[in-house]
Image (cartoon, helix red, strand yellow):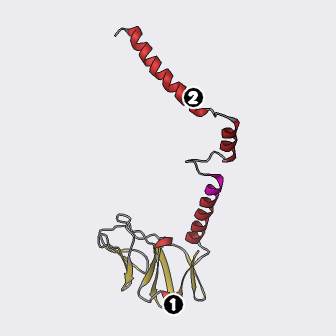
Amino acid sequence: MTDTTRRAVIFGAGGAGLAVALSACGASDGDDMTASAGQGGSQGGQSQSDQSQAAQSQTAQSQTAQGGGELAKTSDIPQGGGKVFKDQDVVVTQPEAGQFKAFSAKCTHQGCPVSSVSNNEIVCPCHGSKFSAKDGSVTNGPATKPLAEKAITVSGDSITLA
């Protein structure tokens, strides 16, 4: 193949690809352009109402995770134990009578969710790590970092994320 033929083949193939790409950018009629503009540049073919509903759902989940929703009653959290709230990614403990603490429910070893709290220890079932229910510090490895503390508010008998 000569140099001229090679350029023609490359240009021809590249030109065809460019033509396809450019035609995909254009609309076949005015309705397509209006629909795209009306969707606010939606991604993945979602309609504006679908995006709005998804945003509202994420906002509601975020508000619950960041506060505003009651997690539990103080009577739900046993002294020397605790309760894992998977949906909020938090574990609430009561290391001493009337003292409530909250920590991330993800083990710092490999991110597994912790499963339970007993004898003032938060337990990760994946590799056996244990954390103090008082301050989240590691009491048994392989984890080497403590659980991150989360802010909670105790008002009367109600516990909420702050």
- Dominant secondary structure of the residues highlighted in magenta in the image: helix
- Vertical arrangement, residue 16 with respect to residue 140, above or below: above
Quarter of the image where the C terminus is located: bottom right
- Of residues 86 and 43, which is closer to you in this image? 43
- Return the mark for residue 125: none
Q: Secondary structure at mark 1?
A: helix
Check disc 2 and report its element: helix, strand or loop: helix
Q: Which residue is mark 2?
A: 22
Of the pair 37 and 141, the residue shown nearer to us: 37
Q: Report how many numbered discs are placed on residues in the image.
A: 2
Return the x and y of residue 127 as percentages of the image width and height.
29, 70
What residue is rendered at 38% in x and 65% in y?
111
Give the residue at mark 1: 75
49 is within the stretch colored magenta: yes
Mark 2 closeness class: few <14, some 14–19, many ≥20 residues within 10 Å: few
Specify which label sits upstream in the sequence, 2 or 1. Answer: 2
Residue depth check, mark 2 versus mark 1: number of the one nearer the observer: 2
- Circle 1 packing at 10 Å, graded few (<14), some (14-19), many (20+), is few
Q: CA distance from mark 2 to mark 1?
A: 65 Å
Q: Label 2 sits on what residue type?
A: Leu
Could you say which quadrant of the image residue 35 lies in? top right
Residue located at (46% from left, 69% from top):
148
Left or right of 78? Residue 37 is right
Q: Is 162 left or right of 80, judged from the image as shown?
A: right
Q: Position of residue 140 (x, y in %)?
A: 30, 74
Instruction: Say if the magenta span includes residue 33.
Output: no
Which quarter of the rendered picture does the N terminus lie within? top left
Image point 43% across, 13% down: which residue? 7
Judging depth in this view, the residue of 26 and 3 nearest the camera is: 26
Identify which amino acid the numbered label 1 is placed on.
Answer: Ser
- Which segment is the magenta one? 47-52
